[in-house]
Image (cartoon, rainbow, N blue to C red):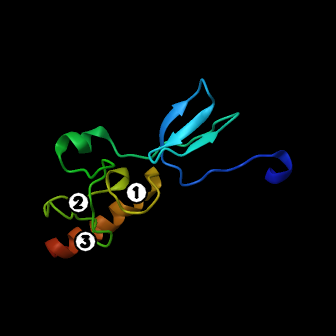
Amino acid sequence: MLHEKGIQIQSDFAIEQVDNENKKIIDYGGKEVPFDILVTVPTNKGDELMERSGMGDDLNYVPTHKATLQSKEYTNVFVLGDASNIPASKAGSVAHFEAEILLKIFSVILKVNL
């Protein structure tokens, strides 16, 4: 159907610039793609707080061990939800389930039955 309608999808295109006057997008390598209607999804990034704290990576996520939820750089920090760079949804429900995992990890560390 996209072909029938003359619609082209350009994926994996790192836009550096949108030239709306000339209706084209330009990537970092200088490649230009013309457009009639531009629909783009910005890169998902973590909160600026992570950048300001110095704990975040280039996308403002805290590098995290996915099995333990422990920060890779700060051993006394555990990371949940959209603060971590774990390849998982950043929805609140994920943080909820991560909290349950973290509780089990803490119960082992503290040697208590929670």
Q: Residue at x 20, y 65 (%)?
A: 72
Query: Mark 3 is on which residue type?
Result: Ile
Residue 44: % across, % down: 44, 47
Q: On the image, which quarter does residue 67 sit in?
A: bottom left
Q: Nearer the viewer, residue 94 or 89?
A: 89
Position of 30 relative to 71 (above/below): above
Q: On the image, which quarter does residue 104 sit in?
A: bottom left
Provide the residue designation for mark 2: 78
Q: Are marks 3 and 2 in contact (CB under 8 Å)?
A: yes
Q: Residue at x 81, y 53 (%)?
A: 3
Provide the residue designation for mark 3: 105
Helix, strand or loop for disc 3? helix
Q: Is residue 11 left or right of residue 68?
A: right
The residue lying furthest to the front in this view is 30
Residue 88: % across, % down: 44, 61
Q: Is residue 85 left or right of residue 40?
A: left
Residue 20: % across, % down: 58, 27
Mark on residue 8? none
Query: Mark 1 is on which residue type?
Result: His
Provide the residue designation for mark 1: 96
Q: Are marks 1 and 3 in contact (CB under 8 Å)?
A: no
Nearest to N terminus: mark 1 or mark 3:
1
